[in-house]
Amino acid sequence: MKYINAILALFICLSTTCVEAQKKEELSDKYVLVIHGGAGTIVRSKMTPALEYEYTCALEEALHRGQYVLDTGGLAITAVEVAVKFMEDSPLFNAGKGSVFSHEGVNEMDACIMNGKDLTSGAVAGVRNLKNPIEGARLVKDSSKHVFLYGDEAQEFCLSKGAVYADSSYFFTEFRWNQYVKARDKGAIILDHDTTDVNYQYKTLEELEKFGTVGAVALDRYGNVAAATSTGGLTNKEFGRIGDSPIVGAGTYASNRSCAVSCTGKGEFFIRGTVARDIAARMEFGDLTLTESGERTMKRLNKLGGSGGFISVDKNGNFIMMFNTKGMYRGVVTNEKNAAVKIY
Ligand code: ASP
C-alpha cells in the first residue's frame, strides 16, 4: 500500500510540475495598457502648467496601477478595471466623482467592461449612486445572467453584489453644477470636451471645462485583451439619454480574435457608426492591421460628422490612440516602455 501511495504522490508531483511548466511557457513577457481621459477641444494655449501637471500625474498614476496588475501576471480585465476606477475617483474626469449633470440636475453614469477572451461583458447605465460605475459593470459581467442593466434596478443589483454606494453629494462639484446651469439656461446639450471661447485661458481647475470620459484597453501576459469605459455622459442630457460608452460595439469592445477598443466623443455618432466593433470587424473580416483598421474607421466617423477618438490594442500588442479633435488625454505603458502620457 505504501508503495502504491508513493507512486501516486510521485505521479501527482510530476503532473503538477508539468502543468506549471506549461503555464510558465504560456506566460509571455509582453503586456500593454493604453488609457484615455476624453478627447475634445483641448489646446495648449488654454492650459496652465499647473493643470497640465495635474492631468499628467493622474494619467500616469492610472497607468501605474494597471501596469502593476499586468506585470505581476494579472488579467487584462482586472487591469482595465483598476485603471478606470482610479480615473473615476479623480474629479478631473467626467466619470465617477467628476461626472457632469443631466437635465434633471443629477449625475447619471454609464460604464461597460468587456473580456476579449470569452466575449463576456457587463454594463450599467443611468446609475446615480454607484461610487465606481465600472465596478458595477464588472459585477454585472461576473454575477448577472444579463449583460446590460439600467437605472435604479441596475444599482440595486450592483449594491446587492457588494458595489460601494455613494450619496449624491459625493458626485457634486460646483464647477460641474455651474456648467449645467449655463447649458440648461441656453437649452444646450453639451459634450463635456468642447468649449467655444478659444481665446480664454483657464487659470484654475474649477474654470476649466473638464474633459473626460475615461477608458482603458489592455493586453495581458496570457494574450487576452480587455476594454473598459466609464462616463457621466453629456451635460444637460435629457429623457434618460444613454451614450455609446456602455454599449458593446459602440463605445466599448474586446475580442481576442482582433483587439480591444474604448471610445470617447459625441456618443450618438459612435452608436450609429458602431465604432468600437467596426475597428475589430475590419481586422477580423478584412484582414487589416490595427492601424489600417483604425484609420478607415476614423474616416468613416469623419464622414458621419462625429468628433472624438479611440484607443485600441490588438492581440499582438500593437496599439493606436486616434482622434479627430484638438487633443485627447491619453497614455500607454508596456513591458518594454515606461508610462508615457500625452494631451495634444
Ligand atoms: N461618449 C460619451 C457619451 O456620449 C461622452 C464622452 O466621451 O465624453 O456619453
Image: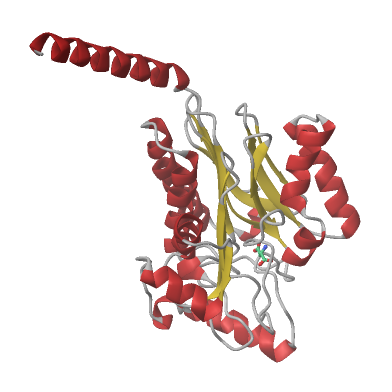
Kindly indicate the quadrant of the structure image that contains residue 129.
bottom left
Q: Residue at x 43, y 69 (%)?
A: 158
x and y percentages locating residue 117 in the rendered image: 56, 38
User: Can residue 262 be seen at all in this image of the molecule?
Assistant: no
> Quick check: 58 left or right of 150?
left
Q: Quadrant of ligand 1?
A: bottom right
Residue drawn 78% across and 46% down? 278
Residue at left offset 66%, top offset 61%: 247
Q: Is residue 229 above or below residue 5?
A: below
- When the figure is inspected, residue 318 is found, relative to residue 163, above or below; the finding is above
Q: Nearer the viewer, residue 195 or 216?
A: 216
Judge from the rendering whether residue 246 lies leftward or rightward of residue 91; answer left or right: right
Q: Is residue 288 visible?
A: yes
Q: Position of residue 88 (x, y in %)?
A: 47, 61
Q: Position of residue 212 (x, y in %)?
A: 59, 61
Q: Above or below — where is 154 with respect to 21? A: below
Estimate the x, y position of residue 120 in percent, counting from the top left.
Answer: 56, 49
Seen from this angle, which residue lies furthest left? 2
Q: Is residue 290 above or below residue 137?
A: above
Rendered-image quadrant of the N terminus: top left
State left or right for residue 248 relative to residue 88: right
As drawn, the residue found furthest toward the front would be: 1
Front-most of residues 13 and 277:
13
Corner quadrant of residue 19: top left
Which of the pair 54/155 is nearer the observer?
A: 155
